[in-house]
Image: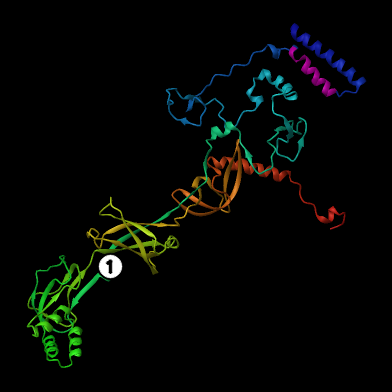
Amino acid sequence: MSRSAWAAGTLAALAAGGLGYGAGHEGSPVPALVQQARTGFAHWLPGTRQPSSVPARVPAKATGPVVYYRDPDGKPDYASEPKRTADGRDYRAVHASEDVRFDEPDEAEAMPDAGRGDMAMAQATPPASARKVHFYRNPMGLPDTSPTPKKDSMGMDYLPVYEGEDTDDGTVKISPGKLQRTGVRTAVVERRVLSMPVRAPGAIEEDERRISVIAMRTDAFIEKVEAVTTGDHVHKGQPLLRLFSSEMNAAAAQYLTGIGYEGARRRLENLGIPPEVIDEIERTRKVPSTMTWSAPRDGVVVERNVSDGMRAKSGDTLFKLVDHSRVWVLADVTERDLAAVAEGQTATVRARTFADRVFTGAVTRIYPHLAMGTRTARLRIELPNPNGDLRPGMFADVTIATGSDKPVVAVPDDAVIDTGTKQVVLLDRGEGRFEPRPVRLGTRGDGYVEIRDGIAAGERVVTSANFLIDAESNLKAALQGLSEPEPRPQAAVEGKAP
């Protein structure tokens, strides 16, 4: 046995005898005296050194492969490869052996092993500059507190709760270090105009009200067709053809003789003779051998079914004219989006032929029936087309701006925590305090969601890492639930049998 071990054993025996004597005469608990002996003679035991003379332990060198690189200033910025800051400093390499954590280390972990004995003494007598401990809380979250430091049945120290931290106002307090490491970001609640665009495929069609058909109301023979072909643009009053009809000539002669003057003119109109031809007959007082048919409106010839010398029967279509100065866009909107669309809303159309051009119109009609095969509803958008660039049959992409043009209270989509049964946002109360607030949502659009009830403009909400704060809030609520006493039956309270 070495001399140091023999001396340590002798001192321990003497201390035990003295402590036993003192316990028997003074009534002091033996375990407490033993603890005092261990504290007083710990520095004499083999392998121990006096804490006052031991310098701080040098941290162990990091070992293992490099896992990632982090900002040298401790900002929540990481990289998988070597990287430099804006001022040219290298990011710090983090090895596999290093302790990576997102909460603040407690004081006992931050101090060297040799100083933990002093740490316990420092906790018993905190410095005047330290925060004042209000009470101590059970480390397992049980509803048990203590005004002084103590241990639970498993030997775990009770956790100190400092003044200002024991609030029951529904807020959650996060340390500044954790806020920095988890990348918590906030945004101010503002009033803004939200638009939720509805997109649908469409096609350009003719305006049904701008189509004219030239047809015969009696049998006739085509004398001459003017130099007009399919695709030509004609103007109102421009001659299209000359024809001969015995019935028309008879009606014109009756009109000139004055027999039943009013009825004779009405007969000419019923035969479809153009008004300018009737006026010419009245002016010249002659029945023409052939009558000239002219275009009833400006438009494009889309059909020509007539040739020189042919016989046209009653009801035959000779020409079909369409005015393309205004066109329709027929779009198919899904059944899900139909409720957001209304007549009068502004719509933008991008024809696939002109991908860089935007045409603006309005929704003028929502058709009353759904297409059973596609479960879509058809709506009509009217567009001006003065240059004729938009042609019937073109495909187009339609975007309809839904929603109101009035500003509403809105937050970013990322600020809302949706559990399926309720929606919550986290209000930033400052100094690391956050309050969960239930909200009622409205329309969405442009990356924002309307808040109809729960918060007001000017408040600040969490937009990033809000799920971590929500977890802290749920944990606190659970612990508070454990600490709430169960209600006792009224009969038991009054001392009566149930």
Q: Is residue 415 above or below residue 90?
A: below
- The one of 478 and 325 positioned closer to us in this rendering: 325
Residue at far top of view: 3
Q: Nearer the viewer, residue 9 or 495?
A: 495
* Quadrant (top left/top right/bottom left/bottom right) for the C terminus: bottom right
Residue named by callout 1: 207
Compare residues 329 and 65 and report the one nearer the observer.
329
**Residue drawn at point x = 16 percent, y = 84 percent:** 218
Residue 145 at x, y percent in the picture: 76, 36
Q: Which residues are magenta?
A: 30-43
Give the answer, above or below, for where 423 lies relative to 309: above
Quarter residue 395 falls in? bottom left
In depth, the one of 289 and 176 nearer the eye is 289
Q: Is residue 218 left or right of residue 147?
A: left
Q: Considering the whole magenta stretch, tell me its main secondary structure.
A: helix
**In the image, residue 40 lies in the stretch drawn in magenta:** yes
